[in-house]
Amino acid sequence: MSREPIGPPNALVSPRFATSATFARLPSTMEVEDPDIVVLGVPFDSGVSYRPGARFGPTSIRQGSKLLRPFNPALHTYPFSSVQVADDGDVGVNPFNIEEALLQVESQATCHVEKGRKLLTLGGDHTVALALLRTMSKKYGPVALVHFDAHLDTWDTYFGAPYTHGTPFRRAFEENLLIRNSCYHVGTRGPLYAESDLLEDKGFGFEVITSDEVANSGWRLCVDRIASGVGDSPLYVSIDIDVLDPAFAPGTGTPEAGGLSSRELLQMVRALGEVNIVGADIVEVAPAYDHAEITSIAAAHLGYELISLMSLNFKRQT
Amino acid sequence: MSREPIGPPNALVSPRFATSATFARLPSTMEVEDPDIVVLGVPFDSGVSYRPGARFGPTSIRQGSKLLRPFNPALHTYPFSSVQVADDGDVGVNPFNIEEALLQVESQATCHVEKGRKLLTLGGDHTVALALLRTMSKKYGPVALVHFDAHLDTWDTYFGAPYTHGTPFRRAFEENLLIRNSCYHVGTRGPLYAESDLLEDKGFGFEVITSDEVANSGWRLCVDRIASGVGDSPLYVSIDIDVLDPAFAPGTGTPEAGGLSSRELLQMVRALGEVNIVGADIVEVAPAYDHAEITSIAAAHLGYELISLMSLNFKRQT
Amino acid sequence: MSREPIGPPNALVSPRFATSATFARLPSTMEVEDPDIVVLGVPFDSGVSYRPGARFGPTSIRQGSKLLRPFNPALHTYPFSSVQVADDGDVGVNPFNIEEALLQVESQATCHVEKGRKLLTLGGDHTVALALLRTMSKKYGPVALVHFDAHLDTWDTYFGAPYTHGTPFRRAFEENLLIRNSCYHVGTRGPLYAESDLLEDKGFGFEVITSDEVANSGWRLCVDRIASGVGDSPLYVSIDIDVLDPAFAPGTGTPEAGGLSSRELLQMVRALGEVNIVGADIVEVAPAYDHAEITSIAAAHLGYELISLMSLNFKRQT
Amino acid sequence: MSREPIGPPNALVSPRFATSATFARLPSTMEVEDPDIVVLGVPFDSGVSYRPGARFGPTSIRQGSKLLRPFNPALHTYPFSSVQVADDGDVGVNPFNIEEALLQVESQATCHVEKGRKLLTLGGDHTVALALLRTMSKKYGPVALVHFDAHLDTWDTYFGAPYTHGTPFRRAFEENLLIRNSCYHVGTRGPLYAESDLLEDKGFGFEVITSDEVANSGWRLCVDRIASGVGDSPLYVSIDIDVLDPAFAPGTGTPEAGGLSSRELLQMVRALGEVNIVGADIVEVAPAYDHAEITSIAAAHLGYELISLMSLNFKRQT
Amino acid sequence: MSREPIGPPNALVSPRFATSATFARLPSTMEVEDPDIVVLGVPFDSGVSYRPGARFGPTSIRQGSKLLRPFNPALHTYPFSSVQVADDGDVGVNPFNIEEALLQVESQATCHVEKGRKLLTLGGDHTVALALLRTMSKKYGPVALVHFDAHLDTWDTYFGAPYTHGTPFRRAFEENLLIRNSCYHVGTRGPLYAESDLLEDKGFGFEVITSDEVANSGWRLCVDRIASGVGDSPLYVSIDIDVLDPAFAPGTGTPEAGGLSSRELLQMVRALGEVNIVGADIVEVAPAYDHAEITSIAAAHLGYELISLMSLNFKRQT
Amino acid sequence: MSREPIGPPNALVSPRFATSATFARLPSTMEVEDPDIVVLGVPFDSGVSYRPGARFGPTSIRQGSKLLRPFNPALHTYPFSSVQVADDGDVGVNPFNIEEALLQVESQATCHVEKGRKLLTLGGDHTVALALLRTMSKKYGPVALVHFDAHLDTWDTYFGAPYTHGTPFRRAFEENLLIRNSCYHVGTRGPLYAESDLLEDKGFGFEVITSDEVANSGWRLCVDRIASGVGDSPLYVSIDIDVLDPAFAPGTGTPEAGGLSSRELLQMVRALGEVNIVGADIVEVAPAYDHAEITSIAAAHLGYELISLMSLNFKRQT
């Protein structure tokens, strides 16, 4: 890159509590020419089955991201100055029509992905992951998936609706968007509707690493298993914030006790290391149930690590 | 009635903080034979344009109603022992399909209304009022309407959707469910999309009594005007809890500063007096934004007054 | 008084957000010789019938009182420098034995009252008013009563218990602690168990001024009626904070919609004017349900007005 | 069993956010003939020494249990369809008389236990455990005890009261309700009144496994020790939710920093495995201090695991 | 104006819950050429004497303003399309140096005011009003003042500091920024440090209209008095949100019980009518103490009315 | 000591929910003659860079300390009866002048430290640590430092200010208050402004033990490293509560995801064991962002452990 990337404003001139509508106070896509990594919000929660409110998730994650600083010591990188990161604002999604909303997300995401940009999407409920996997596979073919979540999200339908926050990965499987046997659910726990939920999921080629297993085997072993399964495939990382225990993420729609800690999850994401992340999302942040930004700060830090990994990947490719 | 109505359990045997899933700890419809007044919940919020969460409204209003006692001194009546009041639980509404949800509500409501029962519906968002007006007009023909709300709710469409919480009364007008010139919006305030919102609304035959007017003319004059306009017509009362100022009803989805106080609204409802209420709803309670049940207690008290009025009407008719 | 009363510390030396355990940052009774007015806490809530938590009321009202300043412009007086006001801390009440707790309160209150000190008690639940009325009548004989409350508090028993927060004034009547026909309930509203609640209450000699009546007649007329009924009798003022609407006092145990505003109540208390207040309480502040100290600040301001009135009374008597 | 157990309603017909007053939306005891496992609420908090509010615990745990689903993958069982589980509602306990309340709980519990039903009690404060141990020992003789708690709960008296939430297990020892040397306190931590608290407790035959020891030795070793000590004895499991760190259970009355995580506790409960649980309780959930149902969801999940273990035990016995 | 003003985006394309960092989702000053009215944030709270947090006020008021719509029916105007309104973001104020911060605010404000633009400032604490009055008087000479506040804000110093949120109007008087006898404090209440606070204030030429007076005389009479005193003078309107009762504005730093209602205040602001407002501020919104945006929504509505008045003034002048 | 130390009042006479303004309900310094350990509050937050509010920290930590009891089983000591511990209240710090505030803190701290008393300071923001290190080094010469914090706090300036909560340890280094290479940052995590932050910090002689390292190496190894580095040097322990994860300490000003758990931190503090702690602080508790006292209870427990260690040190020295 010939031009120096534009980063957040100097915190000594514009204090970090000054108003801002972009992730990490980064420039908007209107202020930069050709970003490498784009942050995109999807204020959508019409696919939820319990507590709604994730439509306010993008705003709250951005608010929680104001404290992010330029240097990532854990990954030893400056994500915002090694490549150009920019915030594209929120997609104008139809709250009353799930299928139209999926098309609106796909359309906006495709604008960026087809130019080789990597995408970090801030949800919104998990329904939107389907639109993003469609986008990714148009560009890259089927992708590997690392899916952090308390739930499998491979149900079939809910009240007859095929596209909800409980179904994106089943639909993705059916639409051949995923690389069979390179897909992982991490952090699952809690009761299911039936044992068949697990069996069907396995039949689709997913591997499950439960929250208990992360605790008992240690997160590093789990990540090693994932990384070796993913290999060099283009990888999509989808983080449902409810993978964290409700203590670490009260602000979400379908909480389950017994989840990961923020520290475990941040370490796992970072340890993914040199995988080839082409897109990622952080979903299901519902700020009406958050307190003191606990949830949105965790989400913002996860976004920072994902951007850092993506930026390192760009550097390796250059 | 030959049989003594069943009321709430004795608070000296079952303390009022004991668990209960019915309004005012009344019997459920499964426990009584032929109720006169039915409370029905509609846990639905897929029609909202801003903060969702009213799907948890019925549960929260019932929780806020535990302190209601048998004697209404303001109206000098025992609503739960003069007629049989019972709680029918919640309609199983489809959260992903507004039109199907409207049919589900209408179907369940019709079961009661066609038997001459009066209905108090606990929302849910305001979309559901359309289903209830359809139900009412099937039984009674077009009805008069007293609509307490910060908003007019006579928009046309939102994101292309004809059935949302901003449109029920325009649809009701179009479907001839209302008696022209016997319809009142009370408590409206705040900015609108355009002056045409007002002009169209007037064209549909609605009269507007703003929140400021209630304050400045006094609530009694306003009610007198309404009561004389309604006369003996079958009347539907629809209370969007956001008619209250956010101080009195923080737990709602589209709050507007400058609203009524709880005391004003309770007095206005009671003062409706001998009108012929055939059905009523209390909608838009979103408990994720409530605090210490301020909103759900106000809603529960409003429900109590509405039931009291309906019960007095039964007595007058007998 | 020969000695200058000790007031709160200078807010320019010790900022008002510095820690303090006394009302209005006044001296404790251990720091002054013979106070004229004593503030006493009763951290007790074993008499409540719904939400507990008033045991933390005294601490929260004191915390809410930190912003009180020395000059009362509405009553044109310096309450803390015209007489000596001091905080006696909290009575060590037994939480598991209501009758013992009543004796403990009476014992501590009597220490002050028998010396001619006026007493402002911070509850705690309303049960404690009985102990205070017993104390007052030992000194002054039966007293007049102005009782601000959403409820009558003249029930007989609850779960067989004669001493609870719903019964103090019936017990007080039975024990001849009150001057018949000089007792007022102000701000009552909401449903009752039975019409007999009202009839019995009237039979005990109480007059009821409802919350609606305050609104509709205006607070001034209501206070004029009270003041003329009370005359020069020794007067006890008991303020259940739930007399305020839940918007103005969410932090309480048995909230009822439709109450007074803080401004109305403050004006009514001040307008009592030259009555002879010998004791007063502010009860039922339950901070677990409060938000941003809305309730405890209202309670603290009410305490300030009551102390101001008491101090003016001392001055008139000197 | 010849008859198919009745489980929760289909979540695709009645959405899980619909109103419900039973644990996990299970049938009430009035809807089934002879349940195997009964859930019983005790809305009682008159025995607490610090923050009250656990009287609302049963309602809040049931509200937090709405997301529970039929299949338990961690224990590989369908607890609600292998045996009949039903909710018996709340015991009508006297809030003003601890000893009467204990008798009321014992009476209602005995109805079920004498028929061989297993009982999961939702508190309420820890006082109620004494009533349940009395019930158990009438049926089974002295029982083994696994007691998860930050505190020992073997104090003698508090303000002269022998029956409070700090004393149930001392009373149980004195009344010979426990099998000596088969009783465990797990998760204790924080300061005590005196070293004698520990020595006396040991003298009663309890073994202490601190929260620190769970962290440092690992939960599995701790459970192995417990399971081998308990053997085949009839076992009562009592979970004071304050065994969790305040981050995982803010909604409780006597919080102590440094507790277990939800994941640790859920794993420990599950790992109890084939012990013979005859009864269990989850107590001290005080929702006024909860946020976003963090505490009540953790409690609900613990209840689900306890029911699962009980149901497996039934199956083994059949 | 030849060019059509740019207003907020169409809410049917970009839902109002989409992320936005501008007041009422208006364009930023970078997107328009020469705005007529500018909204400016000052994230500053280093001048507060009690609860800090107003540094987050501008962000929270903007968040609370998302529901504002284009047509103001109460004033019958379209404020955003009759003139160009734009949001200038937040001034980068030094949180550690009050005097430098005042200069930074004055400098940024002057850029706009010297071009004849009207300015609505979102605080921040009340200290900033001094910078704005300096700005105004440089352009217009001394100005009239309508100051809505629970407090006088004409103290001298606090902890030796001359520039704090309690002193701006004394400093303004001393610096000859105000038109003597055209300055009003409205809504004052609560205790003062000394009677001299009132006397000095009067000596500076201020007139006081207390909160009680607004209630008792009616808001319209009060506004008439103000409007006639202000006449055609250039007027600065300063609204400390604590003029509202804590029920209507919990999210503020020095709350006082007994304040105005939102409806009263909105009506008073609107009724100012044809006065010549040259600048205005809304200060002391501290969102850490707010709930469900009660306070920030009230502030946003007040901002909307002020902008409407300013826009009407432009139209009258053209 | 000849005289028996005065401890907290008997919890069976004065319930722990009674009002109190001292840490652990200990006597105030005015009630004891020559305390050995003094608790000192510093209600100061003018040095914060993000969320203010720590000025209310001392009051909230004391409120959270009411449940502390006399015997520390983990360290097997009675800290309040082996030596005299007393609470000195809050320093009257100037909120508008950081340098004056530092002098005020140093002055008050020196009164105690020069008499050989050990000091536990409750912040307030981290700026105050500089005043305390100055105090310590006047008495003891340079001291070793164990600094628990998410951040390094060795920045240079912020908005030109040399003394803020981000700079105390750089200033301390420059002023030669620290023993080079006996200083540890523990629990750091999250993004930095630049890699130079780490390099400069290292150049000042600090060693960093990150939050991740505590998790991955185990806390015991980390403490061993620290204890051996500190040796017998006089040690100052500074705990920024944000070293805990936001789940365990939401009530703080600059939260970072991925922190320590309360249990880890309590164990680390206790394990410091026989080091020679001469002073300590717990800072950055901002109760406006706390919930249910999660943060202040953790802080109170940390204070209890620090006092216990100091008391054991006194005993070893005697």
Image (cartoon, coloured by chain):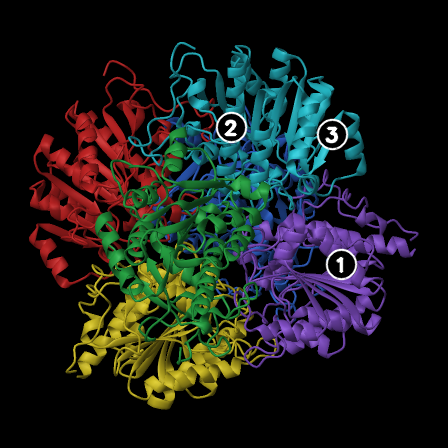
Chain colours: A blue, B cyan, C green, D red, E purple, F yellow
Q: Is C46 above or below relative to B270?
A: below
As shown in the figure, which amino acid type bears the numbered disc 2?
A: Leu
Of the pair C170 and F118, the residue shown nearer to us = C170
Of the pair C241 and D298, the residue shown nearer to us = C241
Q: Which element carries disc 2, helix, strand or loop?
A: loop
Q: Residue A290: x, y in percent? A: 49, 49
Q: On residue E156, which mark appears? A: none
Structural distance between the alpha carbons of marks 1 and 2: 42 Å
Q: Chain of mark 2?
A: B
Q: Quadrant of residue B2?
A: top left
Label 2 and label 3 in one chain: yes
Of the pair F121 and F232, the residue shown nearer to us = F121
Q: On residue B207, which mark appears? A: 3
As shown in the figure, which amino acid type bears the numbered disc 3?
A: Glu
Q: On residue B75, which mark appears? A: 2
C112 left or right of E79 in image: left
Q: Chain of mark 1?
A: E
Q: Is C248 above or below relative to E133?
A: above
Q: Residue E18: x, y in percent? A: 65, 45
As shown in the figure, which amino acid type bears the numbered disc 1?
A: Arg
Q: Which element carries disc 3, helix, strand or loop?
A: strand
Residue at point 51% right, 42% down? Answer: C211
Question: Is any part of residue A155 visible from this angle?
Answer: yes
Q: Which element carries disc 1, helix, strand or loop?
A: helix
Structural distance between the alpha carbons of marks 1 and 3: 33 Å
Q: Chain of mark 3?
A: B
- The reply to whether callout 2 and callout 3 are in contact (CB within 8 Å) is no
Q: Which residue is mark 1?
A: E225
Structural distance between the alpha carbons of marks 2 and 3: 27 Å
Q: Residues within 10 Å of mark 2 (few under 14, many from 20)?
A: some
